[in-house]
Image (cartoon, rainbow, N blue to C red):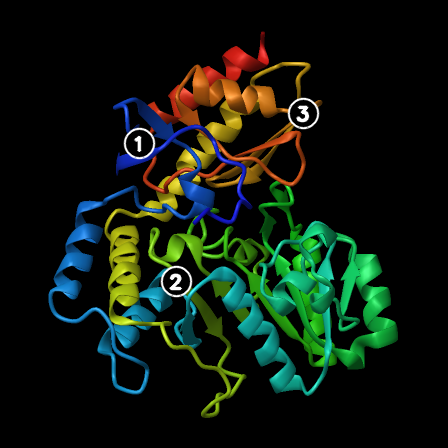
Amino acid sequence: MKLFNVYPLLDVEIVRAKGSTLWDKNGKQYLDFYGGHAVISIGHTNDHYVKALNDQLSKIGFYSNSVIISAQQELADLLGRLSGKTDYQLFMCNSGAEANENALKLASFHTGRRKIVAFTGAFHGRTSLAVAATDNPKIVAPVNETDNVIFSKFNDSAALRELFASRGNEIAAVITEGIQGVGGVQQASVEFLRTIRELCTRDGAIYVADSVQCGCGRSGSYFSHDWAGVDADIYTMAKGIANGFPMGALLISPSIEPSYGMLGTTFGGNHLACAAAKAVANEMLDYNLMDNAKQMGNYLLSELNKIKSPMIKEIRGRGLMIGIEFNENCAPIRSALLNKYNIFVGSASSPRVIRLLPALNITKTECDMVLYAIKKEALL
């Protein structure tokens, strides 16, 4: 049997990892500055994380949501401490796409409306409604096409005001990433996020903050949207929440009331998933990793902006979610970082953008290794 060939693969097989270091099957060592799409938040095979999963697995790995799983409430309490959203409600699922799918479904249940506002450059997942709200026609199958999603221009408050002026009473939800990841590390402005909050409050729509990639402390705040100083109604999470264990989650405003059967999942919030996410949350609290993300992110941004190269168009981002946009296709530079310097970095929808998404406990020494390599390649 062949694998279904939908991934362009690098010619590397990673067989071992520790912290931000990877080893391939030949023993070659690499620096991981991408974390498998921002998934690795506390480092590979973190000791506390491995112990928590092993301890849980030795007791019980899974049972369904038909019984009490006390680890779910323990995780909710930890996420409340990290995010400051202590009065919100937690629903757990299995992925970022599923989190966004449930958030939009919940918004429609709550408002009784059908229309979803998404933005240019958005990536919200590959499931039915999440992919319909994603600005990439290549991955939207005919069965996913719907006139219930309206696209507006990202960071254009005037366009959003016009849309609400004409159709505000039809809109169930507005969904946006605080920092677009696949879209090339484009930050939502403070003014734009405040406008979303204002219009949703005025017209009774739900503000969904897609924090799948830009959340879980990556920006230096638990949710990147919170730099705007306003609360969303629903925050969606995945990727870094469980450091590689498949998990998604929603934090839901107390104004949205649940009812039996409204949402559901077989595997979401299982014993192992909760053990993984609790280990991540405890590690973040014990070692103040959001502050480290802020400090190392500021250092990287400062040093990257000192590189005066005609190849580099713009440096952007916040915390440890950084984009480097070049003036031409940067595939050769990405390839050089991997093959000459043994450093993994990420790409984006634009062939000119490299993404840096290291673990939140990355060190200055590791940052300097990346800075050296990028400077060498950008100044060729």
Q: Position of residue 171 (x, y in %)?
A: 74, 76
Check disc 3 and report the residue beneath it.
Answer: 329
Secondary element type, mark 2: loop
Q: Please, what is the three-letter code of the amino acid marked with disc 3?
A: Asn
Secondary element type, mark 1: strand
Residue 127 visible somewhere in the drawing: yes
Q: Please, what is the three-letter code of the amino acid marked with disc 2?
A: Met
Whether residue 127 is situated above or below residue 49 in the rendered picture = below
Q: Is residue 181 left or right of residue 237?
A: right
Check disc 2 and report the residue beneath it.
Answer: 247
Which residue shows up at 58% across the image and 9% down it? 379
Q: Residue furthest top?
A: 380
Of callouts 1 and 3, the N-terminal one: 1
Of callouts 2 and 3, the N-terminal one: 2
Check disc 1 and report the residue beneath it.
Answer: 22
Whether residue 196 is situated above or below residue 156 in the rendered picture = below
Q: Is residue 289 left or right of residue 331?
A: left
Q: Position of residue 75 (x, y in %)?
A: 30, 69
Find the distance from the CA under tag 2 to the CA under tag 3: 34 Å
Q: Position of residue 324 (x, y in %)?
A: 59, 30
Find the distance from the CA under tag 1 to the CA under tag 3: 26 Å
Find the distance from the CA under tag 1 to the CA under tag 2: 23 Å
Q: Please, what is the three-letter code of the amino acid marked with disc 1?
A: Leu
Q: Pointers 2 and 3 in contact (CB under 8 A)?
A: no
Alpha-carbon neighbours of circle 1 within 10 Å: few (<14), some, or many (≥20)?
A: many
Front-most of 129 and 117?
129
Q: Pointers 1 and 2 in contact (CB under 8 A)?
A: no
Of callouts 1 and 2, the N-terminal one: 1
